[in-house]
Image: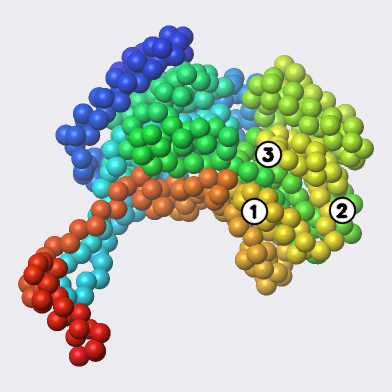
Amino acid sequence: MSILETPATSVPAATGDAGAIAALGTAFAAQRAAFATDRRPSIEARRERLGALIGMMLANRERISAAVAQDFGAHPVPASDLIEVLGVVGRAQHVLEHLEEWMAPSPRHTDPAMLGTARAHIEYQPKGVIGNIVPWNFPFDLSVGPMVDMLAAGNRVIIKPSEYTPACADLLAEMVACTFDPDLVTVAVGGLELARAFSSMPWDHLLYTGSPAVGRQVMQAAAANLTPVTLELGGKCPAIMTPNSVTETNVESVIGTKLIKSGQMCVSVDYALVPRSDLDTFVAHAQSFMARAAPNYSRGEECTGMISPRHLQRIEDMLEEARASQCRIVTLEEDGRIDRETRRMPMSLAIAPSQNLRIMQEEIFGPILPVVPYDDLDDALEAINAGERPLGLYVFGDDAALTEHVLAATHSGGAAVNTCAIQSALPSMGFGGSGMSGMGRHHGIEGFREFSNPRGVVVRGAGDLIDVFYSPYAKAAGLVQAVLSGT
């Protein structure tokens, strides 16, 4: 099929969710039937599929950037290239390098006294048909990215993009339809009713990325079919500045991370914990970095727009609530202002906010960074532990023993030392949450195994005592007595 043809295998939003739901059922049945005829694809077939995925992403690089910019109102092209395209390609290339060793059976020990010459191993077999419910913030990275792991494991995949990114959803559907047979990979485009129906399908595995509130609903729907789930749910990720760590370089790392996608990233820094004596230094370094690196941030091409007018209003309301509470607000841009057409807004610090404010109770997902002072590091860690486990936790400092103490005293899905968020971007490292920030992993060998069934296989040999498990149990009784007596 030509890349310019209308993809017949996707479900366009214009047909409404009733049509989308019916088409989803048809696609699911087709994939189930196809999997039944090819339950263990060869390594050559898997490599071919991953190669096609890489080609698909590279061939559509410019269209992907345009679609992301259209949905967000404004989005820097290099960021789209780096994250949405090359990040996915890098994942696929890493998998291709390691696929043979990951697919190989993993031997297990057997006791020769009991099992003689028997052999045992774990074989990683495909689970079957996997569903992926994708969020709006990284519409290609979080749709095609996990698809790398799913295809590497030998599965078939149906993707449900977010209705908040319609341009990206339509492009993804077209790309996939022009690259893969629909009984291998397809895309279901629709709204809320489709999402609900999608969660209720009897998948062999289901991946959902989004909020904890919706994650609960997805898990409840999946439970009816005993569908295993992977949930990536975000949370309030802290950056912990240990004493003497508030340096220009470290503050740049915190603010630079917060600028990615204007804070609309699940592993973004949600708030910074700073020694009280270093509070003004932190602010000064943040102002200096922005003046040097992005003096006209909200008015330039480096700034990503809020995904919707509603989300923009939510961020404004949170900022105004903090300002009304007499919280000191520092706008990191001279003459910074909101552009409602592109939904861009400047980055702001909220200094020493009250804990009852929305910016301290909700995941912000926008360009506001609360800077919270502390007097004792262990008290600050206790405050983190009193809340829900974050998806990411970042600790800064040159004292290795102290940073290790912070890591040992806290719990999170992932962590980084003297940097932020990079743990989510390594092709070799499993990525996911803990507790309210999620469960399960994708990326790397952990992703391959997440979407595989680790089937244990024993091959009987000679000279074993397996018959002691059979009736009559006189022989078993003798064996038990010998073991207990040490003879």
Q: Mark on residue 348?
A: none
| Element at label 2 | helix
343, 112: nearer the viewer: 112
Residue that badge 1 annotates = 393
| Distance of label 2 from label 3 (alpha carbons) | 22 Å
Categorize mark 2 by other alpha carbons within 10 Å: few (<14), some (14-19), many (20+). some
In front of the other: 449 or 151: 449
Report the residue at 65% width, 21% height from top. Answer: 308
Which element type, helix, strand or loop, lies under badge 3?
loop
Q: Is residue 20 above or below residue 56?
A: above
Q: Amino acid at mark 2?
A: Leu
Residue denoted by label 2: 279
Q: Earlier in the sequence, mark 3 or mark 1?
A: 3
Which residue lies under the disc numbered 3? 363
Q: How many numbered discs?
A: 3
Q: Is residue 135 above or below residue 237?
A: above
Q: The residue under label 3 is which amino acid type?
A: Glu
* Along the viewing direction, whichever of 214 and 124 lies nearer the viewer: 214
Please name the residue shown 47% across and 52% down the image. Answer: 430
Residue type at tag 1: Leu
Are the residues tagged 1 and 2 within 8 Å (C-beta)? Answer: no
- Say which label, 2 or 3, has the lower sequence index: 2
Q: Nearer the viewer, mark 2 or mark 3?
A: 3
Element type at mark 1? strand
Estimate the spatial distance between the alpha carbons at disc 1 and disc 2, rounded to whole Å: 20 Å
Tell me which corner region of the image, top left, top right, bottom left or bottom right, holds residue 405.
bottom right
